[in-house]
Image: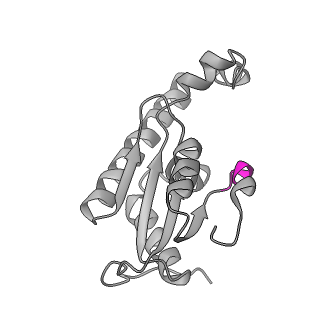
Amino acid sequence: MAIEFTSLGKPPTPNGNLLVVDGLNLAFRWKHQKKEFFKVEYVRTIESLAKSYGCGSIVVLGDGGSDYRKQIDPMYKANRKERYADQTEEEKLEFEQFLGEFQKTVDLCNEKGYLTIKYKGVEADDIIALWIEAHKDSKNIIVSTDSDFYQLINPTV
């Protein structure tokens, strides 16, 4: 039996515990399920996670590209161009629609009062690493499937 989330009530109360969301990474959960519209489910999911982990604040971080990494290493993610070169027009359109829905999701997070951060040319995982460094005194829960975050695990992360 599938569980459906209902309204979780009021937003989390700040308590020093932070739910740090790798925004686009989490959104791919719905893309892989082929769901066109997911903003409400997304917000309910992060609110549920914040409640489960006792987090009083939610931060959603977005990708703004990886310009500086590509300047350091031109081969950084170079294989992705090949992967997308064979996309059909329909696949390109579906991806654009996905990105549009993700932007609506970020807008909804803003409306709900959650901090959302995105910097042009900087990936969310870089922002998250800086965020964690700046918030060492808080308990930080990272929501992502990106294994790069294993290196950040410590008693407060």
Please indicate whether residue 129 sits to the left or right of residue 155 in the image: left
Identify the colour scheme used: one colour
Asked whether the viewer can see residue 4, the reply is: yes
Q: Quadrant of the N terminus?
A: bottom right
Foreground pick, 28 / 126: 126
Does residue 10 sit above or below 139 in this rendering? below
Residue at 37% over, 79% down: 12
Foreground pick, 2 / 146: 146
Quadrant position of residue 154: bottom right
Asked whether the viewer can see residue 34, the reply is: no
Q: Position of residue 121 (x, y in %)?
A: 48, 28
Please indicate whether residue 78 sits to the left or right of residue 59 in the image: right
Residue at 53% over, 75% down: 49
Does residue 84 sit above or below 110 in this rendering? above
User: Which range is magenta?
Assistant: 145-149
Residue at 46% over, 42% down: 98
Foreground pick, 148 / 100: 148
Q: Position of residue 136 (x, y in %)?
A: 56, 64
Does residue 68 sit above or below 56 in this rendering? above
Q: Magenta region, mostly helix, strand or loop?
A: helix
Q: Position of residue 147 (x, y in %)?
A: 74, 52
Please indicate whether residue 149 sits to the left or right of residue 14 in the image: right
Q: Position of residue 3 (x, y in %)?
A: 55, 82
Q: Quadrant of the C terminus?
A: bottom right
Q: Is residue 147 magenta?
A: yes
Q: Is residue 68 magenta?
A: no
Quadrant position of residue 73: top right
